[in-house]
Image (cartoon, rainbow, N blue to C red):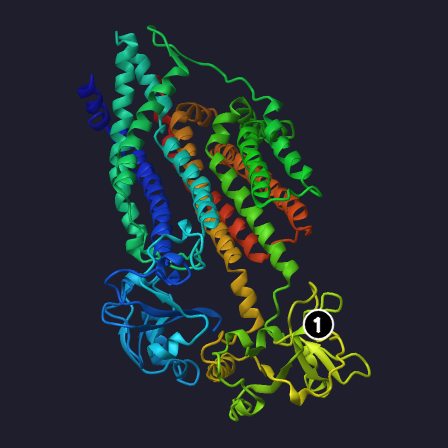
């Protein structure tokens, strides 16, 4: 029977060949997307592992002495260039056997540095006053890919004299380079921690793999009704149910296996483009998108086996008698009880409004449990919602097309919803993430581009960061050329407030002091109270502020200290016109005033850095929805093709009776569009509701509408999905000609 099944699948005439090609092509596309998703998960793990060496010195295991290894002094800091992070590692080996990170030929000596390829290019094309002057010495090599989290990473490793670096308070003496994955490292500060790593992979797996598997399952059942009619004929001539099951299994497995093998070609064609998608905040190397042996075997074996199982299960829904009569049993309509899990999830999240759990673990369990209940409830309630929408379409139908489509959908809403069920997870996760992130950012008030929070820069000389024994910088140490830089509007010195005053819990003040005369020259930073001569301020003249309030609206508290000249210099604040060139030149000059402290930055850069994880989640949500909506459209398109193939004879008879092809196309379009749009509307609404409940319970924030990009992505994805469906409609004319209406 296996041989006969192979002959029927491969050499069963034109119809069999077309069916084999169509099913294989659909499975190939689904397999390619599945492999891309699995490779994306592997790429995230691989990329995160390359962050490990940057945590050297932060993990105690790297500072323990190792026999036969000369320790090296190590200091890592964060700089910025045009708003992008620039990692700087200062190193000083104490001997020839010092540890060397992968990707470097050797540790640089004093006056030498290694730069990442992206930074190497910037150093060659950017004026030295804006970037190159920050790095002493000469470039002796390029950092290899093994040490780069991303091809676009800005990294530099600078060699220093050992005695100089050893004197820096923040430097660590290390004897080995950390290779532990940041996801498994408690002290690591760079890379994805275990929580974010788990959440990221869970989002990818839930929101992408599920729709792809639905699509593959739909593809393997193309022309199921036509196959079942042939199996009925075989029963009539004496075939046993077992033999029919073997034939169905072989036929489905052949097409699925061919599509699976072709899917690897689709994956390798997609891989270069996928590597440029920064859904973790950084792009990938193409080699990161690799497949493990387990991935390959699971796909090569799993998809054909799944197709075979689906083919055998499909026969259980059709009773094939020895007389060749095929009787389909109309499924039982879904009941309203399917709404219970969704209602339970909403109630669970609502219960915690005003009752936030005290511990982090309790909060995580509470919110994840509610979200999981809502997702499961949406998937379970989908057929019932589809049935109610279909009945509404049928009851309000003004044209035959709407009536036919509505009745057909309400007869079997499970099958209609199945093709778009994967869309529920993607839209729910994306909407909830976009709503929560947008609201968080809005409440935290990201500064406008022309605000001093985005255009001013400061260099602070915290006492604990200064090298012991070195003199404290004074106003005389402010470079004379700083105010002459094109684009600089003001250079403002800030004195250090008395520690006992700035830390007084009963009357807290900022750590800095400024004369009201100097502050009046730059009203963009706020003002003094009426009659005051000195104000207590923050070191950057911005500091924490109320949501929605701009720095210029602030009234700083008055200080009783009047002798500012006797106090040490705390910081230098430089106001610029906001141009990139001015900010980078100022940053370079300020860095020379405190070369071992924190690098100067704008408040906007600091806030953007703090919100970088949120941005990664937002980007991940956009990638999920951009990928899942077309996948749902492809699933619907395959379902449409399958439905057209199965019903080509009834449609041909309708055309012979005078029904126009336009009406038949309207029937098919409605059968496909109604489930898609109903699922999208419900999932979006549920996502916003979940976000609103989470924000109110956890942060006491109100839900803010996402920005235009969210609506563009959702609308574009839905339009693309509908366009994919529309592309299948011309097939209706070709397969419903008069010759198809003959008795078989």
Q: Pinpoint residue 555: horizontal percent, then vertical percent.
A: 75, 75
Residue with the mark numbered 1 = 509
Q: In the image, residue 667 lies at what x, y percent?
A: 51, 32
705 horizontally vs 408: left or right: right
Task: Determine whether, in the image, residue 664 is placed left or right of residue 68.
Answer: right
**436 with respect to 245 (left or right):** right
Residue 220 % position (x, y): 34, 30
- At a point 30% along the width and 11% down the height, the residue shown is 241
Farthest residue in the left direction?
A: 3
Horizontal side of 589 relative to 106 (left or right) equals right
Q: Quadrant of residue 395?
A: top right
* Any part of residue 744 in sight: no
Nearer to us in this view, 650 or 250: 250
Residue occupying the far right of the picture: 531
Q: Is residue 204 above or below residue 638?
A: below
Q: Nearer the viewer, residue 603 or 228?
A: 603
**Residue depicted at 42% across the width and 61% down the height:** 58
Q: Is residue 269 visible?
A: yes
Rendered image quadrant of residue 543: bottom right
């Amino acid at each position: 029977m296996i041989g006969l099944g192979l002959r029927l699948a491969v050499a069963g005439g034109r119809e069999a060949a077309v069916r084999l090609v169509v099913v294989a092509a659909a499975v190939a596309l689904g397999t390619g997307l599945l492999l891309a998703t699995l490779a994306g998960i592997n790429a995230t793990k691989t990329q995160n592992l390359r962050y490990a060496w940057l945590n050297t010195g932060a993990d105690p295991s790297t500072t323990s002495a190792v026999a036969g290894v000369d320790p090296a002094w190590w200091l890592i800091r964060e700089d910025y260039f045009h708003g992008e992070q620039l990692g700087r590692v200062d190193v000083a080996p104490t001997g020839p056997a010092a540890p060397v990170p992968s990707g470097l030929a050797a540790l640089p000596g004093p006056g030498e540095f290694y730069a990442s390829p992206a930074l190497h290019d910037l150093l060659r094309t950017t004026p030295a006053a804006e970037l190159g002057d920050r790095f002493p010495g000469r470039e002796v090599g390029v950092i290899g890919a093994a040490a780069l989290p991303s091809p676009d990473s800005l990294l530099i490793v600078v060699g220093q004299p050992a005695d100089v670096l050893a004197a820096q308070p923040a430097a660590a003496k290390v004897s080995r380079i950390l290779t532990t994955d940041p996801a498994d490292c408690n002290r690591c500060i760079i890379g994805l921690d275990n929580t974010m790593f788990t959440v990221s992979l869970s989002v990818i797996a839930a929101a992408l793999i599920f729709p792809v598997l639905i699509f593959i399952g739909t593809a393997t059942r193309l022309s199921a009704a036509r196959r079942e009619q042939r199996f009925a004929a075989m029963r009539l001539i004496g075939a046993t149910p077992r033999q029919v099951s073997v034939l169905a299994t072989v036929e489905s497995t052949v097409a699925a296996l061919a599509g699976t093998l072709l899917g690897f070609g689709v994956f390798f064609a997609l891989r270069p483009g996928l590597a440029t998608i920064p859904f973790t905040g950084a792009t990938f190397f193409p080699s990161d998108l690799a497949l493990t042996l387990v991935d390959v075997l699971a796909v090569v074996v799993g998809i054909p086996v799944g197709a075979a199982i689906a083919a055998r299960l499909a026969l259980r829904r059709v009773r094939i008698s020895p007389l060749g009569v095929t009787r389909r049993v109309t499924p039982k309509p879904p009941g309203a009880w399917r709404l219970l899990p969704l209602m339970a999830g909403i109630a669970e999240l609502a219960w915690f409004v005003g009752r936030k759990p005290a511990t982090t673990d309790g909060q995580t369990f509470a919110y994840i449990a509610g979200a999981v209940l809502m997702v499961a409830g949406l998937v379970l309630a989908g057929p019932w919602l589809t049935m109610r929408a279909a009945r509404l379409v049928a009851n309000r139908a003004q044209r035959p097309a709407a009536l036919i489509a509505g009745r057909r959908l309400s007869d079997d809403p499970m099958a209609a919803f199945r093709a778009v069920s994967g869309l529920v997870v993607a839209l729910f996760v994306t909407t909830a993430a976009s709503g929560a992130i947008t609201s968080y950012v809005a409440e935290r008030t990201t500064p406008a581009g022309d605000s001093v929070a985005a255009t001013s820069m400061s260099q602070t000389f915290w006492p604990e960061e200064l090298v012991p024994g070195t003199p404290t910088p004074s106003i005389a140490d402010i470079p004379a050329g700083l105010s002459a830089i094109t684009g600089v509007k003001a250079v403002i010195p800030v004195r250090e407030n008395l520690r006992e005053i700035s830390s007084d819990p009963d009357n807290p003040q900022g750590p800095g002091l400024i004369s009201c005369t100097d502050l009046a020259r730059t009203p963009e930073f706020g003002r003094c109270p009426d009659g005051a001569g000195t104000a207590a301020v923050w070191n950057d003249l911005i500091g924490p502020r109320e949501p929605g309030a701009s720095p210029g609206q602030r009234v700083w508290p008055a200080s009783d200290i009047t002798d500012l000249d006797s106090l040490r210099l705390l910081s230098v604040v430089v106001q610029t016109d906001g141009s990139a060139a001015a900010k980078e030149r100022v940053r370079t000059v300020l860095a020379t005033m405190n070369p071992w402290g924190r690098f100067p930055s704008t408040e906007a850069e600091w806030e953007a850095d703090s919100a970088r994880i949120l941005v990664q989640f937002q980007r991940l949500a956009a990638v999920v929805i951009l990928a899942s909506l077309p996948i749902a459209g492809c699933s619907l398109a395959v379902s449409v093709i399958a439905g057209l193939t199965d019903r080509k004879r009834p449609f041909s008879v309708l055309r012979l009776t005078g029904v126009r092809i336009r009406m038949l196309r309207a029937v098919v379009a409605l059968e496909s569009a109604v489930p898609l749009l109903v699922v999208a509307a419900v999932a979006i609404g549920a996502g916003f509701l979940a976000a609103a409940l989470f924000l109110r319970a956890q942060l006491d924030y109100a839900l803010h509408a996402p920005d235009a990009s969210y609506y563009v992505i959702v609308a574009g994805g839905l339009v693309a999905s509908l366009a994919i469906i529309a592309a299948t409609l011309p097939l209706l004319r070709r397969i419903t000609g008069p010759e198809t209406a003959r008795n078989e």
